[in-house]
Every structure is written in C-alpha cells, then in structure tokens.
Image (spheres, rainbow, N blue to C red):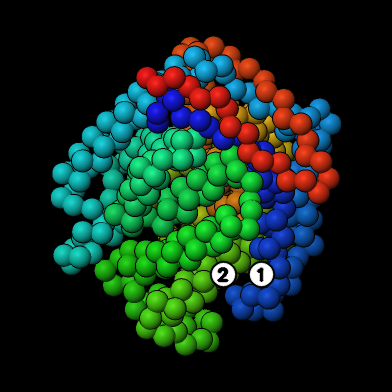
Amino acid sequence: MNPGARPILEPPSALSRPAVIFGLVWSVVVFLFLVSLLREDMALELKTALLVGGSIAVFFYMEHFFGFSKDGSSRRLFFPPPEIYQRQVLYIRRLKRTLLTVWATGVVLTVIVQRGFPLLWGLIGDPRGYADFGIPTLNGGLVALYIILTLLSFHDYLASGRLRYAVHTVLLWSYCLAIMNRGLMVYLILNLAGYYLLSRRLTGHRLLRIGAMALVFLYLLNFVAENRHAESKATVRQYVEETSEGVFQESVLGDLKRGWTWLLFYATAPLVNLNYNIDSVEPNYYPDYTLRALFPTIVREQIFQMQRQEYENRYALQMANTAFNTFTFYANYLRDFGLWGCVGILALIQVLASRFYRSAIQGQLGPKLVYCGIFAAMILTPFTDFFGTLIMIAQISIGTLVQAGLRRAGGEFIPVDRPPPRRGHRPRPRPLPSLPAA
C-alpha cells in the first residue's frame, strides 16, 4: 500500500455487530428448518428452541453489558498522526512480504511432495481428492498464514482503493479453488465480508455489487461441491434432484439453482441433526470431542485413533441423515458438558466477540484481523464449530502480534471523535489528510 494513500473513514455496518449477525443467521436457519424437506415432519424440540433463542438473547445482553450504545465507543475511531501512520504502513508491507514468502514456500513444498494439487488431479484423472492434499500439521499453519495474508491484502485495497490490491486479494482467494476446499472457501469469504462490514456501510450501489459477487461465489461453491472427488459429480446431482424433487437444466442458471438448493440443505441439516439428538444425548462431563480439534493432526490421530473408528462414531452425535455429518456449533459441547455447558461456553465466546469488536470498530488492525475470524465463526455456528479449532487460536495469536508490531512501529493510536449522524442524514466518508510520499 502506498504510504501516501488517503484512507476513508466510515462507520461500520450494523451487520458487523456480534449480536445482530448471530441473531439474524440463526433466525434464518430456524425458519429454513421449519420449511425444509430434510426434517421430514420432525418437530422443533423445546430444548432446541430454548438453546437457540437463549443464545440470541444473551448475545444482545452482552452487547448491552459492554455499553456500545452508552459510552459512544462506536463513534470513536483510533488513528495515528501522518508520520506514525506512514511507519505502520511500511510495517504492514514488510509483514505481508514475510507471510507471503513463508506461505508460498510451504505450498510449493506441499505441491512437490504430493505431485500436484486437487484441481490438477481432477483434470488429469488422479483419483485423489481435496482431503488428500496437505502435509499434516504443516497444512494447518499454512492455512492460518493464508487467511491473515488475504485479509491484509483486502485491508490495503479498502485503505487505498487501488485495483491491484483487489487483484491480489482475488488471486489469493482463488487458491481455495486450486485445492478444491469448500470449507476454507466459505470461511475465507466470510472473513473478508467481516472486514468489509467493519470498514464500510452498506448502500444500495454496494449491495448490488455484493449481490453480483454472491452469484459468482454460489456458482463456484456448487462447482467445488460437485468436483471435489473424481466420481462425486453424478452422485451429488442425483441426491439433490431426488431430495428436492426438482429438475435442473444443464446451464449456468441450472448450476446456480442446484447450488442454491445444496446450500439450503447444508443450512438446515445440522439443525436437524442437533434437534434429533437433543433429548437423548448423554453428556460425558469431561472434555473429549471438545478437545479433538485443538490437537495437530498427527497428535490427534495418535490420541483418539479416529481413523480406526466406525464412521458414525467419529462424531459427537448421531446423524438423522447420513448424507450430512454436521451438527452445528453446539454438538461437541452438548455431548461433553450438556445443555448448561453449552450455555457457559457460549457466554465466554460472547465476551470474546464483544471485546474484540469494541477494539475493531475503533480502527485497530490487529483486533480487526481477529474479529473477522470470530465474525466468520459466528455465521458458521449453525454448521460447525470454528471456535474450538487451531485456526481460530492461530488467528487470535497472529492478530494480537500484528497489533503489538504496529505499536512498536509507531506508538499508540490517537482517538478521533466521529459525531453521531443527524436523524435522516447520511454522513459522508471523512478523508484523512494526505501523507507525504515515501
């Protein structure tokens, strides 16, 4: 990023708030559950309704408890003076180079060792799929660096408006296509969405552009879902058509419709599985499934011997539909600690989300990088648990280190008051003074 760039200051979108996005996502998922074909007349259990409804209510309480609406913190943006800002921009530039070098070296080493990557394997007829790519343990570290690197490129684009940084971001994101990793693709795009909502308000023009990009993303998501394995395309299409009782044309529009149907299935199947188990699950009352994702792959396999277990026994709950092995964020905590354990752990996560959000809306880059991961994990709570993973721990650690590096590079941020908008008045973005060229 050019040290002489003029960042534009805008208030964050309301959709960036933890309580708002969590409540909105879960409300939509519960509605989809009630109209979904997957539940097959299954009623929404009282415990499920209390767990979801109580979680939403506590999120709003936590936000009120931290006083976002009382102390005016959302109207204060911390920004350094020009000379300090220039040093911090140079620090971010060096950091990006270092991360890119380490990450690219690891990826090239992996491709050499495994003689290719999933997209190439599919093109040449290699039977290996996306799950076979990556050197255990090393791959997890590379993913964490990759997420931070992509966010920093997107940060440069939003701060400078330069097209080349947008191209850098898209090229980095396309790595998900090369390795055909649908989960990483979704997690990264939600991280980017979180950063955008922290930095920009949503206007009609921006919503149109976001909608167009969402259609492209939906098409690519369907492409990856159907082509992750050499023989999966026909199976996936047959299942979607039989379950939805629909007919899909062989066209771009047909692929979009099929992708949307598949997305709706994935949005409701985890809640179906949770609802199916919630009255019968017997908690262990010790951390078992909760800890599994916190060990590197090599260590996890030695301790838990997951590959030797029956497929169904690898998961905390039983599947109502064996086509979907996802159980929402709550599954592992419900199995290990019961209903009240879920409530306690979610309360800790709510505190974490609220604290980092407070710092992120003040413009601090390190907390922004952390909160983007929290934002993505909250949206994905109806599908799976990203909070109890090494990726989340790594993102929190790297974001904290980035903020410490920025302080060493230029000192503390200086608060800039942003007056609240008048009723019916839309505030204009405030450009900061130009900085001298490097």
Q: Residue at x 76, y 65 (%)?
A: 45
Residue 356 visible in the current orientation: no
On screen, 132 above or below 152?
below
Q: Position of residue 235 (x, y in %)?
A: 37, 77
Quadrant containing the C terminus is top left
Q: Residue at x 54, y 48 (%)?
A: 193
On screen, 360 above or below 203?
above
On screen, 338 above or below 366?
below
Pointer 1 residue: 32
Label 2, residues with CA under 10 Å away: few <14, some 14-19, many ≥20: some
Splitting the image into 4 quarters, where does residue 352 fall?
top right
Q: Are marks 1 and 2 in contact (CB under 8 Å)?
A: yes
Q: Residue at x 72, y 30 (%)?
A: 418
Pointer 2 residue: 264
Q: What's under tag 2, amino acid-wise? A: Leu
Q: Position of residue 90 (x, y in %)?
A: 40, 21
Give the mark count.
2
Query: Is 411 positioned to the left or the right of 73 in the image?
Result: left
Q: What's under tag 1, amino acid-wise? A: Leu
Distance CA(mark 1)–CA(mark 2): 8 Å
